[in-house]
Image (cartoon, rainbow, N blue to C red):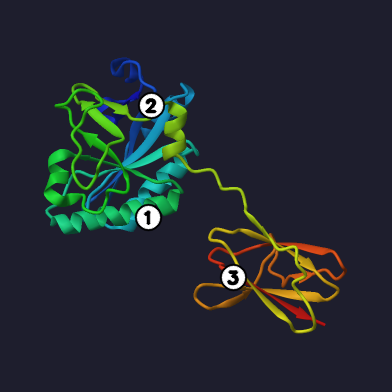
Amino acid sequence: MIPGADVSSWQGPPPWQLSAGAIDWAGVKFSEFKPGSISYRNPDAGTDFAYLRRLGKGRIAYLFGHPSTSVTATVALFAGMCDALGLEDGDGIALDHEVTDGLSAAQVSQWARDVLRLLERALHRRPVCYTYLSFAWAGNCAGLGGYDLWISDPGRPPGYPRVPAPWNTWRIHQWGVTGIDRDLADWPSLAAMRAAIGRPRPKPPRIEEDPMLLFRGVNAETPLALPEGTAFVRFYAGPQHAELRCHFPSGQVADVHLTGTSEKVLVPAGEHGVSVIRLDDGAHEVCAVASA
């Protein structure tokens, strides 16, 4: 397990680490979009984040959420700070989810689901959700069980927090809240933590090859179903040119695009002409249509 801390402007600028003890990572409050459309940016966030980077520590940027405010404005404020302060691939992000603003549990949990989904889409990594026991027990976290839990349970020894529904396990335990908030992360190493909560590396492209001659005769059409997630397809041309078309789940037909172009793809003529086609997102089928 990996010792850490979480800080906001309450701790002031570094070196707050001196009071945090030996830590390998820290969470830093970035923003809070408050009721009344008030945008708060932690004035110490930039110094804190740069300090952690300079020391080679892990970093989690977090926002404090208000369910009575706009989802998009909340995420936009936070994402803007992430851009300005240099969020890196190994950095994590988190939602501090602990107030209701007087809304119902159903409204509060729906707001959190929307924020977490938008955060993941905007910053290309899966957020962590911070909360505390009684808040979760009241139903304010319904539907959030798919996100890693950062649970505040200072009444328990480090690494032994209680886990509220809808979660079955925890990832970060905030076990100390005196002077500075102390945490313990349940990963075997800092590298493993960064890999888990940072931006995932892109998967290498999968090539679906069919060595058969696909195009036999003028105006012949050969459909090819693709495995889920296929990004590239390699075609072998016969003596005819062939136009390739990409079919999408919606039924729409679109030209297949080569990287950097929007031209129709013509497989070169010749006995062993080869064309590698990059597929648009959502493609699940390719039709190779031979032409004279």
Q: Marks 1/2: CA distance?
A: 25 Å
Q: Earlier in the sequence, mark 1 or mark 3?
A: 1
Q: In this picture, is 241 found above or below 66?
A: below
Where residue 25 is drawn, which disc sits there?
2
Q: Residue at x 61, y 58 (%)?
A: 231
Per the image, label 1 sits on a secondary structure element best described as: helix
* Residue 122 at x, y percent in the picture: 43, 52
Which amino acid, mark 1?
Answer: Leu
Q: Is residue 123 visible?
A: yes
Q: Residue at x 28, y 27 (%)?
A: 183
Which amino acid, mark 2?
Answer: Trp
* Residue 236 at x, y percent in the picture: 77, 65
Which amino acid, mark 3?
Answer: Glu
> Which residue is identified by label 3?
285
- Local crowd size for mark 3, using a 10 Å CA cut-off: few (<14), some (14–19), many (≥20): some
> Which residue is identified by label 1?
118
